[in-house]
Image (spheres, rainbow, N blue to C red):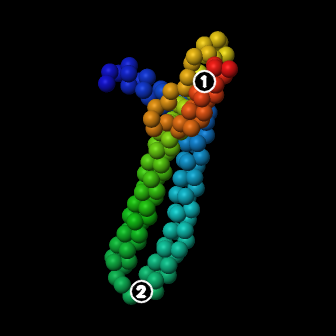
Amino acid sequence: MTESRLQRSNRNLFIMPGFQGRMILFVLLTGVVCTALTGYLYYTYVVDSYDVILRHSSLPQELKDQRYHDLLVFGASLGVATIVATLAVSVWALFITHRAAGSIYHLKRVIDEIRAGNLSARVHLREKDEFQDLARSFNEMMDRLGKG
């Protein structure tokens, strides 16, 4: 794919930036809240429990330090996994909203064409786009209006 086509393709991901941006922001904020909640629960329950157990343990300090290090690595891994999952869901939401926004954008464009006088304009959505039923109903309505 040429560079200009790639730039155009990336630019076209945000057909309706307001709608798509709000949806993705919602997903990202939900992910941040989940990450913070997971971190808080992890720290308050697991770390506090380990701390009580290890403080009263007769293990050598070297083993205690290793347990704390393992706990830190596990907590960091849990945080990274939550962030990666949030980013993956955000990318998925971008593509889902792109399908919906593309359908709305195309329908609006056809309505503008009809308003401008092109009564033969019809909505033709991609096979996987959302709102196929709406497009079909709109086209049927325009066909009936054209006959009457």
Residue that badge 1 annotates: 143
Q: Decide which of 144, 19 is in the foreground and name it.
A: 144
Q: Decide which of 127, 3 is in the foreground and name it.
A: 127
For image coordinates 37% across by 74% down, the residue present is 67
Q: Relative to 83, does residue 48 appear above or below in the rendering?
A: below
- For the C terminus, which image quadrant? top right
For image coordinates 52% across by 68% down, the residue present is 43
For image coordinates 42% across by 26% down, the residue present is 9
Which amino acid does the dot numbered 2 rest on? Ser
Which amino acid does the dot numbered 1 rest on? Asp
Q: Relative to 39, does residue 62 appear above or below in the rendering?
A: below
Looking at this rendering, what residue extends furthest in the front direction? 148
Q: Which mark is residue 77?
A: none
- Answer with mark 2 or mark 1, whichever residue precedes in sequence: 2
SS assignment at label 2: loop
For the question of whether residue 17 can be seen, the reply is no
Residue that badge 2 annotates: 57
Q: Whole-percent x and y of residue 65?
A: 37, 73
Q: Whole-percent x and y of residue 146?
A: 63, 19
